[in-house]
Image (cartoon, rainbow, N blue to C red):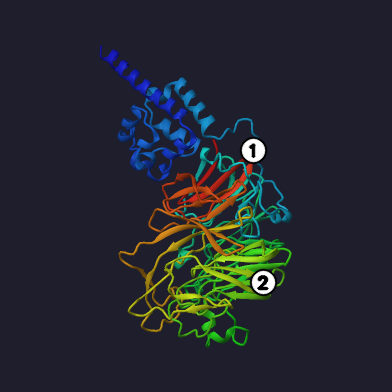
Amino acid sequence: MRGQLRDQRNEKQFQRQMATVKWFCHLNQWQVVNHLIFAVRHLRSLFPRGRHPSPVQRRLEKPPSPDTLSPRERATLLISAPQFGLIFSTHLSKRMRQSRAALSLLALCLGSGYAAGQSGRAPVSTDADIAPERLLVSPPQQDWPSYNGDFTGRRYSGLDQINTENVKHLRAQWVFHSTNSDSMEVTPVVVGGVMYITSGNDALALDARTGRILWHHSRPLTEGLIDDASAHHNRGVAVWHSRVYLETDNAHLLCLDARSGNLIWDVTYADTRLNYGATSAPLLVKDKVLVGTSGGDDGVRGFLAAYDAITGKLVWRFWTIPAPGEPGSESWIGDAYLHGGGTTWMPGTYDPELNTVYWGTSNPAPDFVGDTRPGDDLYTDCVLALDADTGKLKWYFQFTPHDLYDYDATETPVLLDVPVDGTVRRLLVEANRNGFFYILDRANGKFLSATPFVEKLNWATGIDAHGRPLLTGLKPTPQGTRICPSMTGATNWFSPSYNPSTHLFYFLALEDCEMYFAGAEKQVYKPGQTYYSTGAERIPREAAKKIMLAFDVPTGKPVWRYPQIGEGDSWGGTMTTAGGLVFFGDDAGELEAVDARSGKPLWHFNTGQSMHASPMSYAVDGVQYVCIAVGSDLFSFALD
């Protein structure tokens, strides 16, 4: 009798589990991923060995809708098909695991729904020769071959399969989980169906259709670094022929074989003992790899360097802080130039016709006290126009002379050819951290216009006819001074974008102020220590606000604005497409799509993690994908 009752109980349990499997099979991919986000991180605590997770089990006995699961319950299932199947089957009953029918159903479910239809498709090949001509394609189509997609920095994709009418059907296709970073800042590079990414000092090649690892080059994170470099952020790779290039946190330039991930050469280009580090993605121009450093707040002397892409030998170096006797050295007294900042910690842009590289520089050091650096402090807070072959300076434009607010000019200098008054002008457009939207002539650096794009702006009243700010006299003090924008800036390194169909420039702005403090005593530079000379603090009861903005480039005026819901903490950027969309990381931890012309919200996906990267788009086998790094994961989406 007991055996019969036990068999009946087992049979009922088996039927409940079969119903659960069938329920999973009927979920669309958005619902699945919505349930499967953080399992790697929380699996051990939520699935104790030898028993089911009771809260989730109770929910699954009566198949719920996705919205009824709590975030913690959504974190109980793994995101990729093989891992999901392994963990799910591990926690089924013995009877369930022994059932061929149940396992077949589960396998069918996973194979068709979560492996992105691998059956019948040839694997992508890493055996490719990425010709330099592919880096010149603008706008990018199926490939996304560099950090910004192309040399212009527009982050505009020519793909239009996903558009304003069907974006509501966008679903997550796969998620890749990083094991050495909880704040990925990478923009993936995709060429020929292979996706190249970085996480910490690691580089990986993935099948861009499924997220499956093709190769993995592993390198330990560096100990003993300070400030930004100590966070081990890495923003991606550059590709050229059969080679992949990346910067490491301790300022090494690595050259890898794109076919296998094997190391070809390793060049040290800055000394971490002097507080240098690196956080950027390299820029490949012709046959040279351009790299910069972090450490502008730590007393380093900034530079941009170009290395031979084949041999790794230094070709040229441009120092952003002039040495004594050089043009622009007037601000730097004694050996102050050796610690003046002006680092080059974000990728620049490039005009092949003018053979000119455009690169932004960071703040002067020390940040908040300017007594040791009188004058304009060249070439900090500048965009530099350099000859791509020699590194010689063609022209510069300084956004914030004698900066006391940490207003780096490392925002993307976007290159646009735009009709203005009946004439096509070669423009450089930048939404700067200081709160003004600038338009320059990129052929000669001539200032054309500047428009404030935030309301909380009190360090300057405007910009004069020569492009210099009209200062209010506010500056950091030992007692503290309320200054707007905050030290984070009215915008920052997260990417803007430009759509040539709308002539609109899109970027995330931040309305925020902070109390700025200056050190009462002179700070002396020391290796291993930061060189801020104090800092800034949030102001109680003053809330920060993120706003998505669209500026009309021909007029330099705002067209629409989309206020965000959140605490102003997002560092997500933007990307726009030929499908009439703008994708961006909003302030609620969501990847969002809006109408590029009106800003109307059309779609969103809650990632459950904070944004520190910008989206991109690519296509494989005729399918368009949208991809973004969020927290420790990489999400890729396509139409359902």
592 left or right of 326 in image: left
Quarter of the image for the C terminus: give it.
top right
Label 2 CA crowd tier, 10 Å (few <14, some 14–19, many 20+) = many
Q: Nearer the viewer, residue 465 or 439?
A: 465
The residue tagged 2 is 386
Name the residue rendered at 73%, 55% in the picture: 133
Q: Amino acid at mark 1?
A: Pro
Q: Position of residue 27 (x, y in %)?
A: 46, 31
Q: Count every numbered label the image shows and give the total.
A: 2
Between label 1 and label 2, give the one nearer the viewer: 2
Name the element at disc 2.
Answer: strand
Can you see residue 70?
yes
Q: Amino acid at mark 2?
A: Leu
Q: Is residue 337 above or below residue 24?
A: below
Name the element at disc 1.
Answer: loop
Q: Is residue 197 above or below residue 49?
A: below
| Separation of residues labelled 1 and 2 (CA atoms) | 42 Å
Q: Nearer the viewer, residue 364 or 426?
A: 426
Q: Position of residue 483 (x, y in %)?
A: 40, 73
69 left or right of 374 in image: left
Q: Which numbered disc, 1 or 2, marks the residue that appears first in the sequence?
A: 1
Name the residue rendered at 70%, 63% in the picture: 422
Q: Position of residue 552 (x, y in %)?
A: 58, 60
Q: Is residue 110 above or below residue 408?
A: above
Label 1 CA crowd tier, 10 Å (few <14, some 14–19, many 20+) = few
Quarter of the image for the N terminus: give it.
top left
The residue tagged 1 is 123
Q: Among all residues in the image, which is located at the extreme top?
A: 1
Can you see residue 231?
no
Q: Position of residue 34 (x, y in %)?
A: 43, 39
Q: Nearer the viewer, residue 544 or 81?
A: 544
